[in-house]
Structure formats: structure tokens, C-alpha cells
Image (cartoon, grey):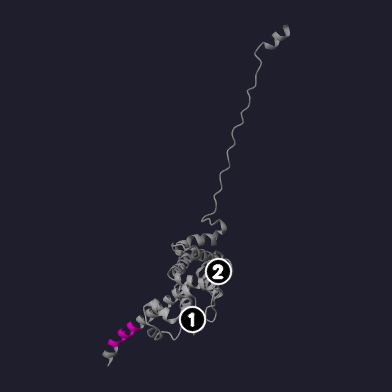
Amino acid sequence: MAKSTGSRTPRVRRREVEFARTREDILLAAARALGRRGFGSVSMQEIAAEVGFTAPALYAYFPGKEEIFSALRVMLLRELSDTFQPLPPAGLSFRRRLSILLGRQLEWADRRRDVFLAFLAMRERGEAMPVRAQGGPAHEGPAAHILAMARWMRQAAEDPGEVGNPDDAACVLYGICHGFLLRWLFSGSTTRLADETERILDFFFHGVSGASRPPQRRPPARRAPVRRSPVKRPRPGGASQSRSS
């Protein structure tokens, strides 16, 4: 019996992995359909066709489109939360540790760009995302992300002076990242958002100048030497000759 149980375990695990991958494929296909048609117009048949399923096969994974989009939302929240772990290695500067974290999150945004575009299209149509997620976080959305970022900064900063007030710092960083994300989505750029990691950090640490290092002071300009006209000295004997004349 033990041998039989041991031989079945890898098979069960493979099925679980395949089931999870299929669910993810369905969620991403649903996001693409959502971006084109909107939640109110898209049907389960269209979602099934997007992923290459029949509608009855799709119902084996989700009972309806509301559950699909709720699961999509939960998936995104879970994936974003997972980027905070593990903490970067000790001994690095605070900026370097923050760069590792931000790079993870922007790479995640690159992978899920279709989902962001779908949500953006839905917002432009004035549609609301259905929320029927079961077992989701108690606090969700931007506020939860800012709190998680502030908590991470407290752990990552070896010197409290490196970050100042973590709550304020997390809020500022979120605003900068959100601005870059929206511009990236609206512009239709094909570049990777993760490539903007260091630019975002330059703005975060150095303000709107975006300078990666403080400006160097220019040496004082050298003044040109003042040229003085030569003083004419009287020739010897000149004064006595003028008197005699």
C-alpha cells in the first residue's frame, strides 16, 4: 500500500499543476476578451473560444463569468503580494534592496500587461469590476499595497535615516510607479516597464530633477587679469630743459 500511495503522489501533483495552469490560461484569456467586449457583453462561449475550449469544458473550471473575473482579481492581488518575499540579501544598500523589490513588481506588470489593459478599457467604458472573490484579502487595492510597501521599507532599511517616514515614502513611491504605469499603458509602448526601475528610483530619491547624484559645484570662474596702461616716466633732464626754454 505504501508503495502504491508513493507512486500516485507525483501523478496527483502533476494533475494539480496542470489544473492550476489551465485555470491561469482561462483567466488570461478572459482578460483579453474583457478588453475587447467588456464584462457586460462578453459571454462564456467567447471566453471558451479565446482559450480553445468548448463552453461545457469551461464550466468544469468556473461556474460563470463573475467567478472568472473575481478569480482574476484574486490572482493579481496574490501575485503582487508575493513580490515582497523574500527580502533581498543583507549587506546591500537600501537603494539596491529597493531596486530588487521594484524590479520584481515591474516585471510582474510586464507579464500581466494584457490584464491591466483590459481593466483600463473597462474603466474607460464606465464598467465596474464584479467582486465575488472568496477568501480574498480583507483590505485590497492601492491602500493595501502602500501599507505593505511601508512595512517592507521598515524591514529593509538597516538605518532608519535611509527612508525617513516609511508611510510617506511608500505613498510617494506608489504615486511615481502608478504614473509610469499609466503612461506605459496609454502610450502603447512595446518597451519593458521593468527597464524603468532605476529612473523611477532616481525620481524617488532625488526629486523631479531625477539626478542619480547631486550636482557638482562648478569651480569659480577665473577673472581675466586687468591690463593697466603703462605709466610714462619723464626722461632724465627733460624737466630742466623745459625750464630753460
Amino acid at dot 2: Ala
Of the numbered discs in the image, which one, if any, rests on residue 70? 1
Residue closest to the far top: 245
Q: Which residue is mark 2?
A: 170
Q: Is residue 118 visible?
A: yes
Residue 30 coordinates in the image, percent (x, y): 44, 77
Which residue is at 58% across, 70% downward? 167
Q: Is residue 80 visible?
A: no
Q: Nearer the viewer, mark 1 or mark 2?
A: 1
Which residue is at 48% across, 81% downward? 70
Quadrant for the N terminus in the image:
bottom left
Q: Which range of residues does the magenta coloring cover? A: 6-15
Which of the pair 113/17 is nearer the observer?
A: 113
104 magenta-colored: no
Residue closest to the far bottom: 1
Horizontal side of residue 165 vs 239, given as left or right: left
Residue 245 coordinates in the image, percent (x, y): 72, 6
Which of the pair 218/57 is nearer the observer?
A: 57
Residue 195 coordinates in the image, percent (x, y): 45, 62
Residue 217 coordinates in the image, percent (x, y): 56, 48
Secondary structure at badge 2 equals helix
Secondary structure mostly seen in magenta is helix
| Label 1 vs 2, first from the N-terminus | 1
Residue 31, located in which quarter of the rendered image? bottom left
Horizontal side of residue 238 vs 145, given as left or right: right
